[in-house]
Amino acid sequence: MKFGGTSVADAERLKRAVDRIVRAKDAGNDVVAVLSARGATTDELVAMAEEVSSTPDPREMDMLLSTGERISCALAAMAINDRGHRAISLTGSQAGIVTDTSHTKARILDVRADRIRAGLADGAIVLVAGFQGVSTAHDVTTLGRGGTDLTAVAVAAALGADVCEIYTDVTGVFSADPRIVPDARKLPVVAFEEMLEMASSGAKVLQMRSVEYARNHDVRIHCRTSFTDEPGTMVLGEQETMERPLITAVTHSTEEARVTLLGVPDEPGVAGRIFTSLAEANVNVDMIVQNEPVAEGASAEISFTVPRGDLRTAHATLAPYVGPVLAEVVDDPEMGKVSIVGAGMKTHPGVAAKVFETLGVQGINIEMISTSPIKISCVIRGDRVTEAVRALHTAFELGADDVRAEDPFGARA
Ligand code: ADP
Ligand code: ASP
Ligand code: MG
């Protein structure tokens, strides 16, 4: 059972999460609960670091950020012990989450869950601090923002859990972010492939790497609310899901920045060198577009998007290339992205046309486009994202009302 930041934000909510954990234990289950930092704690810790350093050392950043999750676990263990159950809280390191050494974005290499198993065998409820591990160099690491989802899935996989329940502040995975599309529809079931595309294009309800891990290790995820008992969304292998509609969801991100390299020599190997440097600096490059020079021998222009948080590192990485290799690096930090995802589009032509037309009617300029077999993404200006999401959601008739109007029994798969 994983509880997100909102679900443990204050004493009352934490006690409600504890109620749920204790109920699951009383129902005869062995229970491991993986907790996030309370409320906005992680953001506050990041802000604290930025107050004292403009380039906080990543190792020390991890020492700092990992404390938030430990607070939640220790408090929950105290509350559980008061209910007459035994609880033991563990840091990521104690729980056996072994990672590589890339601080603030570490990857899990192994889960040595012996201590969790011993706790369970002892009849205890085991609380694991999410979002963190210990590196092969014995340092504390964190798994990237939203990483408690990944801890939960990795622990579920290591223990062979029946299900990994992810408790959050919405009732499941919706056809769009319910905060910006009020008539978004809760999806009863989503296939891993679709969820992966949704997460990678901004639906932060499940962290992308957690979905990837769940797919690779066959972990069933039940994403649901911590506030009521209503069932949420099951994220499962494709073979377990029913036939899918054409489009499943509209997703968005307002945290994109665009970087443009001007005066790139039009010769083999240059892009390879530049993007290798960016990869080595752990910059997450998403969409890439290259404009070929019109005249022979002229230089090219390459644009790509990165998460806004990676912009500073991208500039620092590219600086040595300016002059010797390329003419100039310019950026636009206020970009956004809107995407539509659906396994059904593989076999249906005309989806892209409808996306472009819908945005065109709204007067929204598309700056970059990328596609996968089950996703179409458009980079647009950040301040037009909300409008774009709503227009696409309506155009593809994804709303709860559309389903009712079309089919009075709501039987659309
Ligand atoms: P937690 O702190 O529990 O991990 P997050 O804030 O990471 O919660 O994720 C939940 C949020 O994800 C919701 O409050 C919602 O605004 C947002 N979200 C974005 N896209 C979707 C979507 N398609 N379905 C559900 N929630 C979404
Ligand atoms: N507290 C961490 C974050 O805010 C991890 C998580 O909540 O999943 O990113
Ligand atoms: Mg989250």
Image (cartoon, rainbow, N blue to C red):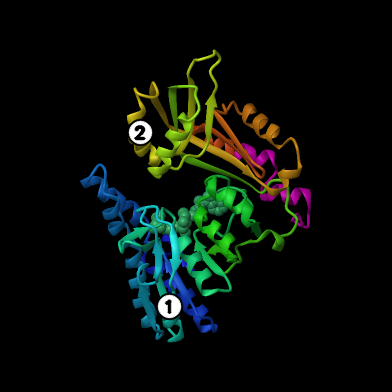
Percent from the top left, x then y, of residue 360? 63, 27
Residue 65, quarter of the rendered image: bottom left
Q: Give me the residue at 40% from left, 23% from top.
A: 326
* SS state under label 2: helix
* Badge 1 density bin: few <14, some 14–19, many ≥20, Cα 10 Å: some
Label 1 sits on a secondary structure element that is helix
Say which quadrant the C terminus sits in: bottom right
Tell me if residue 7 comes above or below residue 124 in the rendering.
above
Query: Residue 256: in sight, yes or no?
Result: no
83 in relation to 282, above or below: below
For the residue marked with disc 1, what is the amino acid? Asp
Q: What residue is at 28 percent from the left and 59 percent from the top?
A: 63
Q: Is residue 371 above or below residue 138?
A: above
Residue 403 lies in the magenta stretch: yes
Tell me the amino acid under the disc marked 2: His
**Some atom of ligand 2 lies within 8 Å of the CB belonging to the residue at label 1:** no
**Mark seen at residue 114:** 1
- Asked if the stretch drawn in magenta spans residue 53, the answer is no
Q: Nearer the viewer, residue 143 or 389?
A: 143
Residue 331 placement (x, y as % from top left): 41, 28
Q: How dense is the environment of label 2, judged by Cα within 10 Å: few (below 14), some, or many (20 and up)?
A: some
Q: Nearer the viewer, residue 252 or 63?
A: 63
Residue 411 in the image: state x and y as whole percent. 77, 57
Residue that lies at the very extreme toward the front in this rendered image:
268
Q: Which residue corresponds to mark 2?
A: 315
Report the magenta residues as a range.
390-413
